C-alpha cells in the first residue's frame, strides 16, 4: 500500500515521478524533499532507508512531490537556500539567491585591506544574502540593505537577526538610494537585469516563482543599471567602490554606463562558468 512507503521507496517513487516530468536533477530533488519531510539530512537517508514514513510524513512527501511536479523549486518548498556558508530563509517576496552571485561577495572581500571599518550599502537586497555574506567575511564592516519591496526588507531583517548580524546590518524600504543621508565606502548590487524578450523564455522555476520585481530589467535589461549607477556615484565616498552583478554579455554596456557616470578602474570578475558576472569600479 502506498501509505507504507519506506524512506527508500519514497525517494525512488519521487525520483521516478520527477524523471517522468523531465526535471533536471530528479534524484537529488527527491532526496532533499524526502529528507526535509522526515527531518534528516539527505546524506543520512540511506542509513534510515527501511524506516516506514509516519502518516504526517507521507502527506508531506506527497505534497512536496506535487509542488515540485508543478515546477516549484526545491528551495521554495523547503523555504531555505544556502549561499556563501550561510542559510537564508526565502519568502515569495525574495529572489532565490543564485550561486553566481557569490562572485560579487568574493570580489568585495578581495578588497578587505583597502578600508578599515567600511560602511556597505546593498541596493536591491532581497534576502540580504550579499550584504550578510560580506559582513560575515569582513567582521569590521557594517551596512544597510535597501529594497523597494517591503516584504523583502522584512525577510532580510529576519535573516540578519537569525544569523546573528542584526547589530551590524540595517534594512530599509526605498527606491535605490532615495532618501539615504549617509555616504558609503562600498556599494553592492545585483539589480534586476532580464530583458523583456528573455522574460518570456524563463524556466517555470524562475518565471513563476521569483518575484517579477527581482527579475525584470526593461526592454534591454539595463534599466536598473541606468538608475543604480548614477545613484551609487552620488552615495559613495571618494575612493569608494561599487560592485555590480551583471547578466551574460552585459559587461560592455554596463562598463559604458559606469564610465559615463565618472567611474574608473573598472575590473571584471568571472563566475565558475567563465562568464563575466561582476564589475567593480572606483569613484576616484
Ligand atoms: C535580482 S534581485 C537581487 C536580490 C538579492 N540581492 C540577491 O542577490 O539574491 C533584485 C532586487 O532588487 C529589488 N528592486 C527592484 N527594483 C528596485 C528599486 N527601484 N529600488 C530598490 N530595490 C529594487 C527587488 O525587489 C529585488 O529584491
Image: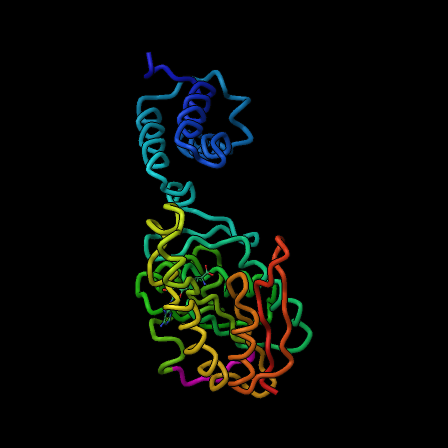
Q: Quadrant of the N terminus?
A: top left
Instruction: From the viewer's side, name the closer residue of 205 and 75.
Output: 205
Using the rendered view, name the quadrant where residue 65 is placed: top left
Q: Residue shown at 42%/67% (left/top)?
A: 221
Locate residue 252, reporting x and y percent.
56, 72
Q: Colour scheme of this structure image?
A: rainbow
118 vs 80: above or below: below
Locate residue 149, reporting x and y percent.
32, 65
| Magenta region, main secondary structure | loop
Q: Classify the position of ligand 1 by quadrant: top left, top right, bottom left or bottom right.
A: bottom left
Q: Is residue 140 left or right of residue 164?
A: right
Locate residue 72, reporting x and y percent.
36, 42
Using the rendered view, name the quadrant where residue 33 is placed: top left
Q: Residue shown at 60%/67% (left/top)?
A: 139
The magenta stretch is: 180-185
* Residue at the farthest top position: 1
Using the rendered view, name the quadrant where residue 95 is placed: bottom left
Instruction: From the viewer's side, name the closer residue of 132 and 214.
Output: 214
Residue 79 within the segment the image draws in magenta: no
210 vs 7: above or below: below
Q: Residue shown at 42%/68% (left/top)?
A: 220
Locate residue 46, reporting x and y percent.
54, 23
Q: Quadrant of the C terminus?
A: bottom right
Amino acid at each position: 500500500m502506498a501509505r507504507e512507503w519506506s524512506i527508500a521507496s519514497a525517494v525512488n517513487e519521487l525520483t521516478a515521478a520527477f524523471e517522468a516530468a523531465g526535471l533536471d536533477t530528479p534524484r537529488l530533488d527527491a532526496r532533499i524533499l524526502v529528507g526535509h519531510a522526515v527531518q534528516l539530512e539527505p546524506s543520512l537517508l540511506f542509513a534510515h532507508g527501511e524506516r516506514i514514513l509516519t502518516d504526517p510524513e507521507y502527506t508531506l512527501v506527497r505534497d512536496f512531490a506535487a509542488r515540485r511536479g508543478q515546477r516549484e523549486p526545491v528551495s521554495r518548498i523547503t523555504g531555505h537556500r544556502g549561499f556563501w556558508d550561510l542559510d537564508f530563509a526565502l519568502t515569495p517576496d525574495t529572489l532565490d539567491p543564485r550561486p553566481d552571485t557569490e562572485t560579487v561577495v568574493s570580489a568585495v572581500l578581495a578588497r578587505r585591506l583597502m578600508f578599515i571599518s567600511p560602511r556597505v550599502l546593498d541596493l536591491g537586497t532581497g534576502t540580504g544574502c550579499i550584504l550578510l555574506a560580506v559582513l560575515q567575511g569582513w567582521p569590521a564592516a557594517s551596512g544597510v540593505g535597501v529594497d523597494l519591496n517591503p516584504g523583502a526588507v522584512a525577510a532580510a531583517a529576519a535573516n540578519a537577526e537569525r544569523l546573528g548580524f542584526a547589530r551590524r546590518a540595517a534594512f530599509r524600504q526605498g527606491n535605490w538610494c532615495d532618501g539615504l543621508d549617509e555616504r558609503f565606502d562600498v556599494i553592492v548590487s545585483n539589480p534586476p537585469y532580464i530583458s523583456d524578450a528573455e522574460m518570456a523564455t524563463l524556466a517555470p522555476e524562475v518565471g513563476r516563482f521569483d518575484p517579477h520585481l527581482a527579475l525584470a530589467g526593461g526592454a534591454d535589461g539595463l534599466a536598473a543599471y541606468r538608475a543604480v549607477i548614477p545613484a551609487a556615484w552620488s552615495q559613495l565616498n571618494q575612493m569608494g567602490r561599487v560592485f555590480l552583478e551583471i547578466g551574460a554579455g552585459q559587461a560592455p554596456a554596463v562598463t559604458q554606463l559606469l564610465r559615463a557616470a565618472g567611474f574608473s578602474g573598472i575590473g571584471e570578475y568571472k563566475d565558475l562558468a567563465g562568464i563575466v558576472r561582476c564589475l567593480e569600479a572606483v569613484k576616484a
